[in-house]
Image: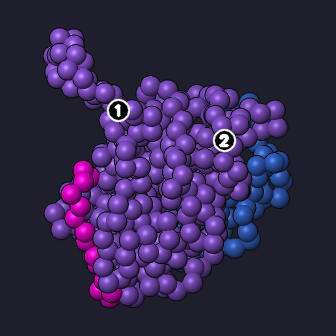
Chain colours: A blue, B purple
Amino acid sequence: MSGESRLYTFSQETKDKLRKFRLSTSRAKDPQAVIYLIDKTTMEIKQTDTEVYKSMTELSDELPDNSPRYVLLSYPLTMASGRLSVPYVMINYLPPTCSQEMRMLYAGAKELLRNQSEVSRIIEIDSADDLEEIEERLKGEE
Amino acid sequence: MAAPEVHHLFHAPISDHSFSDDRSTLAVARDNNVELYHRSGKTFNLQDELRGHDKLVTGVDIAPQSGRIVTCSQDRNAYVWEPSESGEWKPTLVLLRINRAATCVRWCPGETKFAVGSGARIIAVCYFEQENDWWVSKHLKKPLRSTVTSVAWHPNSVLLAAGSTDGHARVFSSFIKGTDERPEASPWGERLPFNTVCGEYLNPTAGWVHDVAFAPSGNALAFCSHDSNVTIVYPSGPEQPPQAVISISTQQLPFTSLLWSSETELICAGYDCSVYRLMGDANGWQITGSLEKDNGRPGLEQREESALNMFRSMDLRGRASSADDTKLKTVHQNSINTARIYQESGGNVQKVSTGGVDGRVVVWTL
C-alpha cells in the first residue's frame, strides 16, 4: 500500500477540493459530478477541469472514448420507501479500447482515491452510455 | 505483350504479398511468419523475417509512404512493424478484440488507419491514438452476418468496401473523428458517421464474395464471387437505387482477387491459375481474354512424336503421349490468391503482380 502512495501524488489543493466537494454535495438538490484523471508525466491525480457537472448526458459527453477516468458523483435519490438519500460514489470509467498501461495506472490509484475522497463505494462502468442507468443502480444497491 | 517476370520463392502457399513503394522490397506471408525479400538485379533474395504470429499469417500490407508493414493472422492479432535505422523491424501489437481469426488487412490510402476483416463477423478499423501512444480498434458490426473475406478502401480513406461469405458486398463509412477529415460528397453518401452502411449488394446466387475493389475514381465497385460471377455496381446517389448493377458470369473457375487497371478495365485472377481481363463501362462488361501467352508456359517445348518414342513412353509412363503433362500450361502452377498493382501511371495500371498457392510471385505486363 505504501508503494502506491509513493508513486501517485495528491497536491494539497486537490485534497482540499475533495473535502469541500464531499461536504457540499450532501445538501445539494441535483446530481453533482467531477472528473479526475491521472497526469501521465507527473503521476498526479487531479481534476480535469473546474466544472461540476449537473447532468448525466453532459458528463457522458465529456468522458473520452479511449482513456480511463475517475468520476466522483453525488446523486440525490428518493427511495421507494420515501426516504431521501444522497449517495456519494466513485465511478471507475474503463473503456475496452484503452491500453494495458492505462488500465494498470488507474487500477493502482483506485484505492488511494477511494480513501482520500471517502466515498461509500466504487461503481465500474465501461462505456459512457452506462451513466444513463446510474440512477437505477444506485437505487438498487441502497 | 512482354513475358511475365516469374519469381519462384519457395514451395509453400503465399496467402498474401505486398510490394514497397519503390518495388525493391517484397513482403510475403509464409506460414506463421512474413518474409521480406530484397530485389537485386532480376531476382529477389531473402533479407529478413518478421516473426511474431503464432498461427498462419493471412494478410500483409506495406504502406507506400511510411514503409510500415501491417500483418494479421489466424491468431486473432495484428502487428504493425516499423522500420528502424539499424534495419530491425519493431513490432507493435494491435489489440483487435476479436474472438476469431483475422482474414485480411489493408492500409487506407492516407495511411492513418487500417481495416482488418475477421471471422468474428466484425471489421476492426484501427487508428493510432497519440495521447495514449496506442493503436485503438473500433468495430464495424452491423449488418455483417458472416466472415469478412476481403476489404478495400475508397480513395477518400473513409469509405470501406467489404466482401463477406454471407454473399453480400457492402460499403461502410469508417469515419473516425479526430483522425479523418470530412470527406467530400460522393455518390455513396454525404454525412457519414461511423458504421453507416452506404450500400449493400447481393450477387444473384448469394455465393461467397471473394474480393471487392473500388474503381480508381471511387465511383464504382466491383466484386467477384464463388459462383464465377463478377458484379460491378455504379451508384447514383445516397439512399437511391444504383445507376447500374452489371453482373457477368464467366465460364472460368471462380476468381479470388480482382483490381481495376483503369476506369473501364478489370484484372481478375483465381482458381484457374491465370489472369484475365474484363472491359466495359456502365452499359455493359465482357471478358476479353487472358494475360497468358498462347503457347502457355514459356519454355514448353514440342517433342517429336516418333513411333519409337510412343511405345517407349507407353512402357515407361503407361500412356501414349510423351508430352509433359505433369505441369500446367499456365505460369502459376496452382491457384492465385492475391493480385496487386505493381506499376501505374496517370490512372492506368501497366503492371500487375500475383501471388499464389504454388509459392510464385509473378509480375505481368498489361
In terms of secondary structure, where does tag 1 sit? loop
What residue lies at 17% left-to-right and 11% top-to-bottom?
A: B315
| Residue type at numbered disc 2 | Thr
Residue shown at the point (60%, 47%) measured from the top left: B19
Q: Nearer the viewer, residue A136 or A106?
A: A106
Q: What is the quadrant of residue B11 in the picture?
A: top left
Q: Give the magenta part as a residue range.
A: B239-254
Most common SS among magenta residues: loop
Which is more toward the observer, A100 or B318?
B318
Up/down of B59 relative to B8, above or below: below
Label 2: how many residues lie within 10 Å, few (<14), some (14-19) or many (20+)? Answer: many
| Along the line of sight, the residue nearer the viewer: B84 or B308 | B308
Observer-nearest of A11 and A25: A11
> Which residue is painted at 73% across and 61% down in the image?
A47
Judging by the rendered image, the residue that carries numbered circle 2 is: B25
Q: Which residue is mark 1?
A: B302
